[in-house]
Amino acid sequence: AVDGGRGAEDSRVYGSNGFYVDLCFVLMPFTGFLLVLLASLSFGFLLRGSLILDTHPSLLIHSVDCKVPGASGAPDVFLSLTYRIEPFTDYGSSLNISLPAAVIRPHRAFRVTIRYTTTDGPAIWWLDAELTCGQTRPLVFTQGHSVCNRSFFPCFDTPAVKSTYSATVRVPEGVTVLMSASRSAYSKQDRVFQFSMEYPVPAYLVALVAGDLQHADIGPRSRVWAEPCILTCAVSKLGGSVERWLNVAEGLFGPYVWGRYDIVFLPPSFPIVAMENPCLTFIISSILESQEFLLIDVIHEIAHGWFGNAVTNATWEEMWLSEGLATYAQRRITTEAYGEAFTCLETVFRLDALHRQMRLLGDNNPVSKLQAKFEPGVNPSSLMNLFTYEKGFCFVSYLSQLCGDIKRFDSFLRAYIEKFRFSSVIAKDLLDFFLGFFPELKESCVAQREGLEFERWLNGCGPPLCEPDLSAGRALTGPVQHLCDHWGVDAPDPQVISTFDLSSWSTFQTVLFLDRLLDRSPLSQGIKGIVHPKMKISPLFTHPKLGRSKTIFLYNSDWIRLKEESHIHQGCLEGE
């Protein structure tokens, strides 16, 4: 199946509106059972007599049972089912469950119970105490994107299928459990956490973290969770900003439907920067080193509450429907909250990275398509790249330009969310709705405009067909380029360079400067690299206004790195 699993095929056979998951685990390792409530939708498929779920070799299946409600007051029927596990690809397997004819009558509900134990799978990350921030207790977290959660529980591991779920987690004393759920409860006597997600979500958005976690409220619907040693820092960095960002987003795109927006900071071993798990964003703790990257990444995850979580790409081949739209929404939020110049600076920084990647891959590389094509068995995670974010953003920006009024496009996005909320879509759904919302654009055939055809945007290789006007950020990007021009000559003049006050620059300006200086490779003979002073290399040049924590040292090397006190986080959004 193109979207990552054999279970995707059965998602068209069994009704997702009746798909219900109940997870019960005991920590280290996870052991428990999965309950799946299904109803057959298509009589034509009933003759096959099987249910296929996505799983993983790391999942040890112990048994599969079935319960069929009795008809007309008759007692329920309990059956032990036969099953087989079939290899599918290097990132998963198929769990093929045989279903007797008595089970799969059209539109009749039945329940399948799968008992299993997890081992060392890609979704579950066990950290010894020494690998956590506080180094006091072990910690475990899950990461389901794109197709890892099949090693957490058997499922329809495709973004095309959404369901509600509930979970029960039994833990040792002193361990706190969080999940991407809208409701939670805890029994101290039994050491049991109970969770439920009342809104339908795809399998990859089911997430869990357990460890020595404490919380602090930072708004009427938000709290920060973290290990005790970093909680104060996290609260001070976010303050009351999250509620402000949520309010701005709601003003642009309509109500935030998930209720809570909480954030949990995870140790630096978290494999990506941030993950938009509903109600509970997972984010790497090292991002606390940079206020600006923290701001951008949290706002990006907030934007996913509308684009990606509420309305989801139906196939991994069109991941831009989540990431491109969320990036556009993120920049609308930052424009309203911090001004157009700030947003343009951040966009220039990201588009520079896109073009840098384009130069490495070449203009004809198929991964640069918005509608990427891949054969069955290819891991969808391989499509996580800057094109889904930035080329997708440029296409969405182009659609907004066609409207002639950004506020009209805001209205379109609100209507789009309202129409497709809690469903999964393809590009045709978005574009057909766009042309229906703006009939004058449909009449003028904008989809076939020469050189900017929608089809070419989606299936053409290479960079974006056009980029938004970022001249509003020139006050911030201009000094960066001027310094780069002066510094990149064969014999840079220290007196001219010293007139630039880098101590007033933002992180984005500093990193943009370093990136553009590196882009001039090979660098001039006297300017080969920038390293941290702790490398004990004598400086060839030090900018007098950088200050002690931003001193630039030059060294005969072809790579550039800047450390601001301890780290500058240059992480990309999510899996970039």
Image (cartoon, rainbow, N blue to C red):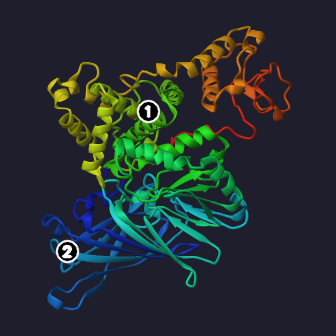
Residue identifier under label 1: 390
Where does residue 79 sit, x and y in percent of width and height?
Answer: 29, 85
- The residue lying toward the viewer, choosing from 100 and 409, is 409
Distance of label 2 from label 1 (alpha carbons): 45 Å
Q: Secondary structure at mark 2?
A: loop
Q: Is residue 205 left or right of residue 139?
A: left
Residue sitting at 29 percent across and 38 percent down? 411
Q: Amino acid at mark 2?
A: Ile
Residue 186: horizontal and vertical position, in percent?
52, 76
Which numbered tag is attached to residue 104? 2
Q: Quadrant of residue 231?
A: bottom right
Mark 1, other Cα within 10 Å: few <14 / some 14–19 / many ≥20:
many
Please report the residue visible at 38 percent of the width from the left and 43 percent of the height from the top: 251
Of the numbered discs 2 and 1, the one sitting upstream in the chain is 2
Residue 432: horizontal and vertical position, in percent?
20, 38
Q: Nearer the viewer, residue 547 or 484?
A: 547
Q: Nearer the viewer, mark 2 or mark 1?
A: 1
**60 to 222, vertically: above or below:** below
